[in-house]
Image (cartoon, coloured by chain):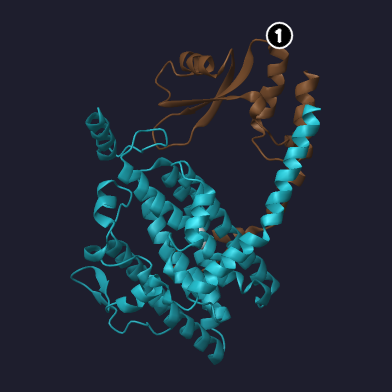
Chain colours: A cyan, B brown
């Protein structure tokens, strides 16, 4: 019986059919999805913090409106993804709890601070840029609700990257000070952006099974290469120095070669020692606690309405 | 027009809850047509292929959700139109009003900077 179900499940995966919430799925597939989608959701939500920090200090009303709209989008992305995860039978409360206790992870990139206005540009261009490479690939993930969420999110992401690059372009063509600000932001965000794709394929704990189940469609290294390739000419166009002196076009491979990533830094940040790990979670806990009275008021109001209706 | 249903819709509208404007009409028509108390109106959604969203295709009357599902299969999928059906009681759908769409959707109309095309980039880097 269970062998039958598993065979049927695998046949669907093989045939590029999507798995839908009410279909039978192996426990491991479900757990793997919950881990990945909720982590993705947490990343969207925590990712609002570094940029949100600049909303009140944006240099013009236009930039402020744009940044506000972008950060608002990220909150929306979090919602799409939490909802997709909920189709697998886990509650929002459980997920928030896992995030706040450190049991669930989020993208390490958001443990880096946004120190200057140029960082807002670098984040849109590089961090959202890297996220887009990953998310475009995930539009073909095997779980229906996740795939459809990705399609929706990708449609909204393009503006995030373009506003970031446009901001960088203005700085890079500005005064010497502005150009230096842009270069500094690029230097600080380039490597962590490469790390967003995760460890090398050989070291990645979840990759093999995820690829077999088609949760992931391309490996960490493939996706990273794609990002390196698309970013090099963009850096060049800005007239900035590439942060990786070893990044050179390789005619034979048809790709850019690159220098090695500092994996000690990667694991250090993942394990909680980044600049802002504690601050990010503390802020989330505080915001959640401060919203408690709103949730309570909503429940009270609902109860009162029901009572009035019944009377 | 069913006064009760109409009042329901109005109160939903006053609460400013969102939904799908297209259903309003079905809901109102339904009150006219269902003379019998035993039949309720259901909205039918079809997934034409695995991986796609369910799409609204129409409505029908049924005694209960299980019956609605079978009727939906009989009347909406005779030519293999779908691989999955959802039925939802029309009464359970909370819809926004087309008349109000101006004020309801207005806040997003004057924000072109939410669109990727708002950002003009030189040709060399315009492929992002
Ligand atoms: Fe996002
Ligand atoms: Fe984004």
Residue B109 is at least partly visible in this image = no
Image position of B30 (left or right of A309): left
Q: Position of residue B79 (x, y in %)?
A: 41, 18
SS class, disc 1: loop
**Foreground residue among A13 and A132:** A13
Q: How many marks?
A: 1
Locate the C terminus of chain A and report the quarter of the image it occupies. top right
Q: Which residue is mark 1?
A: B35
- The vertical placement of A83 against A287, above or below, is above
Identify the residue at image location x=26%, y=67%.
A200
**Foreground residue among A227 and A35:** A35
Residue A130 is at least partly visible in this image = yes
Chain bearing mark 1? B
Image position of B91 (left or right of A101): right
Q: Position of residue B30 (x, y in %)?
A: 68, 18
**Foreground residue among A175 and A18:** A18
Q: Residue furthest top?
A: B36
């Amino acid at each position: 019986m269970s062998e039958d179900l598993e065979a049927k499940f695998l046949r669907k995966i093989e045939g590029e059919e999507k798995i839908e919430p009410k279909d039978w799925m192996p426990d491991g597939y479900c757990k793997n999805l919950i881990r990945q989608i909720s982590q993705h959701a947490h990343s969207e939500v925590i990712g609002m913090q570094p940029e949100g920090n600049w909303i009140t200090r944006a240099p013009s009303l236009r930039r402020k409106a744009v940044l506000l709209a972008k950060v608002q989008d990220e909150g929306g992305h979090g919602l799409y993804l939490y909802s997709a995860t909920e189709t697998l039978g886990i509650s929002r409360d459980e997920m928030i709890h896992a995030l706040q206790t450190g049991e669930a992870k989020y993208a390490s990139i958001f443990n880096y601070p946004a120190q200057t206005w140029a960082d807002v540009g670098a984040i849109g261009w590089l961090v959202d840029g890297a996220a887009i490479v990953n998310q475009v690939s995930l539009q073909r993930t095997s779980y229906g609700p996740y795939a459809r969420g990705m399609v929706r999110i990708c449609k909204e992401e393009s503006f995030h990257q373009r506003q970031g690059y446009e901001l960088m372009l203005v700085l890079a063509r500005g005064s010497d000070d502005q150009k230096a600000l842009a270069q500094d932001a690029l230097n600080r965000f380039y490597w962590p952006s490469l790390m967003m794709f995760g460890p090398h394929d050989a070291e990645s704990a979840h990759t093999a099974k995820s690829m077999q189940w088609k949760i992931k469609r391309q490996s960490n290294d493939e996706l990273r290469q794609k990002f390196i390739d698309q970013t090099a000419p963009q850096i060049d166009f800005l007239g900035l120095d590439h942060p990786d002196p070893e990044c050179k076009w390789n005619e034979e491979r048809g790709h850019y070669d690159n220098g090695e990533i500092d994996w000690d830094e990667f694991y250090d940040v993942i394990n909680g020692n980044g600049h802002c790990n504690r601050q990010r979670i503390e802020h989330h806990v505080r915001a959640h606690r401060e919203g408690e009275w709103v949730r309570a008021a909503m429940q009270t109001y609902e109860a009162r309405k029901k009572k009035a209706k019944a009377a | 027009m069913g006064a009760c249903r109409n009042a329901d819709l109005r109160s939903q509208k006053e609460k400013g809850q969102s939904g799908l404007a297209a259903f309003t009409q079905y809901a109102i028509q339904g009150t006219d047509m269902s003379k019998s108390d035993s039949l309720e109106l259901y909205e039918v959604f079809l997934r034409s292929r695995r991986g796609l969203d369910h799409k609204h295709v129409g409505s029908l009357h049924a005694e209960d959700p299980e019956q609605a599902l079978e009727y939906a299969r009989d009347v909406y999928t005779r030519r293999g139109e779908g691989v999955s059906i959802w039925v939802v009681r029309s009464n359970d759908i909370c819809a926004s009003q087309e008349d109000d769409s101006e004020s309801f959707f207005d806040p997003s109309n004057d924000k072109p900077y939410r669109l990727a095309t708002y950002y003009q980039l030189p040709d060399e880097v315009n492929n992002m």
